[in-house]
Amino acid sequence: MANTRFSQHFELEKSQADLEFVDIPLNTDIRLYVDPYAFAISNDNWYIECNNSIVGFFNSLIKCIRTGNNRIGLEMLGGCREPNETHLGQSTASPRGRGLGPEKGRVLYKSLSESEAAKTGFLEDLNDCELMIPGFGPDTISDISINIIRGHLVSFTQNQCKLHGIPSQRVRAGKIWNPAKSQWESHFSSLPVVADEPLLLVPRDAVRIESSVSAKKFEARAIDFLVQENLDAHTSLVRVLKNGERVVHKKTIKEEVIQKRIQQKELQGLKGFLFDFAREHPEVLVDYKREAIERSQPVPVDQLSIIVNNYSEVSVEMSGDNANFVGGDNMGGVVGSGQINAHDITAFKGHIEQSQISEDAREALLSARQEVEQLVISEGEKTDICDDIGKMTSELENAEPDSGRISTIFDRINKMASSVGAILKGIAAVASAIDV
């Protein structure tokens, strides 16, 4: 059953384009995420019901924290389990969750309940946790969302089985949250089963390659704001260049403003700072989230087809626009020449996850690559930027990175897309090379 897709196992003789659900691989997880905003932007009744469930669950969780009802709050997060049956997430081998369960639930609840963002009611939705609460990343947000909408996914899966004539068995379908009783309840339902494991299908329009929001991107937005604020106020952080131009270096903002505020106020790292910043400048957060929601669109079916085929035993013919995507032996993100492939965002993520460079560098490179997706430029220009991101990654992975080469690559990227350049400046080696 090596790398067999769901449709292959059940002999549906249909491609991803013919299916409403993600055609998941059966022996691994695929790097796609369920994003709460996917339900918030849809007018479809099923999506509206899912959104209502997620919003209701989150509001109840915050209410528990604000009223001190820790028993129910702990039950809510502690009852979330690893949703292996969806085969979504960041696993690279056999399907596995990312540790959701009673223990991680306690850790997450502690982090959430100790946060001023939660205690003051500042958090508005589940995605806010990814921006301002330590421990909440895209995998965790996705897994919690799946747990919350499990009942809806069961119904969707059953409808798809009926539509395509897929056999099912009555099995334990996991726990579903009962808001009326404030408890998780075990349910048995008819689901497709492979190798004695039940499967849950997820609508293809509900998944994303990346989360709509990220702490790193919001930090970049905050830095831009603080740069302008210091320029307008003529602070001591302003430097005057030889040509008379007044500048505030972003590296200076990170060191002299962000890091000092974290230390002075004893904030919870970057996410603690982002809450502190958002509380002072809520309009920046509102604009950032509005843009994030607008960008949260389903993965184009042709791209989704390439992604699912990357995980299957059936290779995709690479031609035309698809030539930028690499599958098969290139799943690690390295093309045949040895150059790192940054065209296929999924393959690039796979490479970055295994890279030995610093965590900050990994996050910045991924954020930069993700930013390329949002650029309104030609496909040729996007290809050039991806080429250079791959080259920069390769250089950063050297034992002694060449500053001159890094600077040259950065200049090319920055000229084509300053927003991508702004993210890459967050990498210490890049900042040093260009003397930010």
Image (tube, helix red, strand yellow):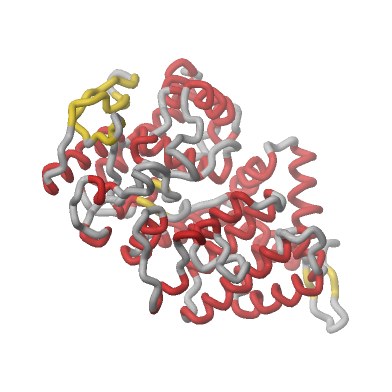
**The residue positioned farthest toward the right in the image shown:** 242
Q: From what the image shows, is residue 66 above or below residue 383?
A: above
Task: Give residue 63's quadrant in the image.
Answer: top left
Q: How many marks?
A: 0
Q: Measured along the vertical axis of the image, is residue 46 above or below residue 227? A: above
Percent position of residue 292, x then y: 46, 57
Residue 219 position in % (x across, y down): 63, 54
Which of 100 and 107 lies nearest the eye of the viewer? 100
Front residue (pair 87, 247):
87
Query: Would residue 251 be visible to someone looking at this image?
Result: yes
Residue extending farthest front = 1
| Residue that sits furthest to the bottom in the current view | 243
Tell me: 84 left or right of 381.
left
Residue 418: name its quadrant: bottom right
Expressed as whole percent of the image width and height from the top left, the position of residue 272 reads 65, 40
Identify the residue at horizontal 46%, vertical 30% (top origin). 62
Q: Residue at x 19, y 50 (%)?
A: 11
- Which quadrant, please, contains the N terminus? top left
| Residue 369 placement, left or right of 424 | left
Q: Is residue 283 visible?
A: no
Quick one: quadrant of the C terminus? bottom right
Name the spot of residue 239 as percent of width and height, x first.
Answer: 84, 70
Residue 172 relative to residue 228: left or right: left
Residue positioned 19% across, 56% down in the render = 13
Q: Nearer the viewer, residue 162 or 295?
A: 162
Judged left or right of residue 310, residue 399 is: right
